[in-house]
Amino acid sequence: MLNAEHRSLRRALMHVTSGGRIGLDARKRAVVRALRGLSFEFFDGDRVGLIGRNGAGKSTLLRVLAGIYHPTSGECVVEGKVASLLNLGFGLRDDATGYENIRLSGLLLGISMADIEQRAPDIAAFSELGEHLALSVGTYSAGMRTRLAFSIATAFEPEILLIDEVFGAGDAGFLHKAEKRMNDLVTAARITVFASHSTSLIERLCDKALLLEEGKSVMGGPVTEVVREYERRLEESPSLTGSRGDG
Amino acid sequence: MWRVWSSLAWHDILTRYRRSTIGPFWLTLSVAIFVTALGGLYHTLFRMDVSEYMPFMTAGLVVWTLMSAFLLESCVIFVEGDPIIKQVRLPLTVFVFRMIMRNLIVFLHNLPILVVVFLVFQVDLTWKIVLAPIGLAFLCLNAIWAGLLIGVVSTRYRDVVQVMTSLLQVVFFVTPVFWSPTLLQGRPLIVEGNVLYHFLEVVRGPLLGQVPSTLTYGIVSGVTVVGWTAGLLMFQRFRNRIAYWL
């Protein structure tokens, strides 16, 4: 992509480490094909997990689904209100308080002021942040930010919920609540798509899964089967370089 | 949608001054000091009567501050919106409107200086002052397409903001902001050919009781039309790339 040290990228690297995904275009600019040849359909009630190694394309796929990245080829059709929890700060403003962020994020999700005001106490309660909500979000820990962002994103009954590896290890209590809420959302005939490295989380929270490797979808199906395949591949070649030369 | 950008704009102002004492009035103060110091000295340099020079300079400065802010801040509208753009799908025009509203709020904070100067020097207000808000509307209308265009180019090429900063510094001196074009013989190209001069006049003129010339209105209208076409084309072509450029 732009600003990469593409001066040091050479064609040789392209095939060995990235299976033809990173290369130089005609104008010698670095190009990364993060996703290729993906084709799938998700329906009401699906709890989809996205698994794969680092760099497989999970975050990119979520961003495409969220409408943030426009596909460079093909099309992406999303029907329904989307709420997403993607990394890098969740769109929360560090310089604003928890309450102010609830309001701002609600507006960003397209909710009316009246609805936001009505749901604000529920959001505050679900996040369990208490008095911290009056402090600026810049003072929060990563776990607190996740709680706030999750509470906001799930408060307004999104029809599609996209979550990107946000549940770090350790916040087990909140994870339990989050799991329950995600299940509730799904029983109301909604779709959730959850990306993670943690196979245990994927198995708990999803019923279907998509295994991504180097931008391609290598398998899609019931979650236990896909997870098994993922683990099998990990055992086979723990690192990305060398053995897999499929361009 | 208007709630989104107006809340963002308000919040930008709020946080700028959250931990300060007189808050947004620091801006007012700095312009006031500039006006007093330079006004006192330059009117003799330009051989203008102080009661004529001060209102002229103040009006020019207040409008110029708005114009240059529009141009400069456009360079970073998408870059500063990075956290939001990467999280939620929003029409990118939200960021342009946010920038415009933010600067209009600042402009309103600076208007009191103008009021004070006008009172002190007993400037006559004529009906022509009604044209000033119309001029302001022209300014804002153009700020939209300029924001989109500059924003797009500047997100791709990150040094545009530096170019803009240097350019504006020079243009500030070349444009009749704190010096009157009446000091020059005739109607020289360096004044009449300067598009920013006409945008300045469209607001300043009516404030000082002068109706801007047909040429001025003509140029401003022309730029609005051409600019909107160019801006929209540019934006349509590259809007999907912006997320990738951030």
Image: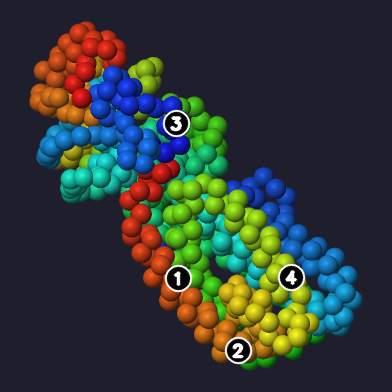
* Mark 3: secondary structure: helix
Query: Which quarter shows the C terminus of chain A?
Result: top left
* Mark 2: secondary structure: loop
Question: Looking at the picture, how far across and down is residue B175, in whole percent?
Answer: 68, 72
Q: Please name which of the two marks, 1 or 3, marks the residue nearer to the observer.
A: 3
Q: CA distance from mark 1 to mark 3?
A: 37 Å
Q: Label 1, on which residue? A: B227
The kind of residue on which mark 3 rests is: Arg
Q: Chain of mark 2?
A: B
B240 over B52 or under it: above or below: above
Residue B213, disc: 2
Q: Label 3, on which residue? A: A7
Q: CA distance from mark 4 to mark 2?
A: 26 Å
Question: Looking at the picture, how far across and down is residue B107, in whole percent?
Answer: 63, 66
Q: Label 4, on which residue? A: B113
The kind of residue on which mark 2 rests is: Ser
The kind of residue on which mark 1 rests is: Gly
Q: Are marks 1 and 2 in contact (CB under 8 Å)?
A: no
Q: Are marks 4 and 2 in contact (CB under 8 Å)?
A: no
Q: Are marks 1 and 4 in contact (CB under 8 Å)?
A: no
Q: CA distance from mark 1 to mark 4?
A: 32 Å
Which of these two is toward me, B202 or B150?
Answer: B150
Asked if both marks, 1 and 4, belong to the same chain, the answer given is yes
Which of these two is toward me, A38 or B4?
Answer: A38
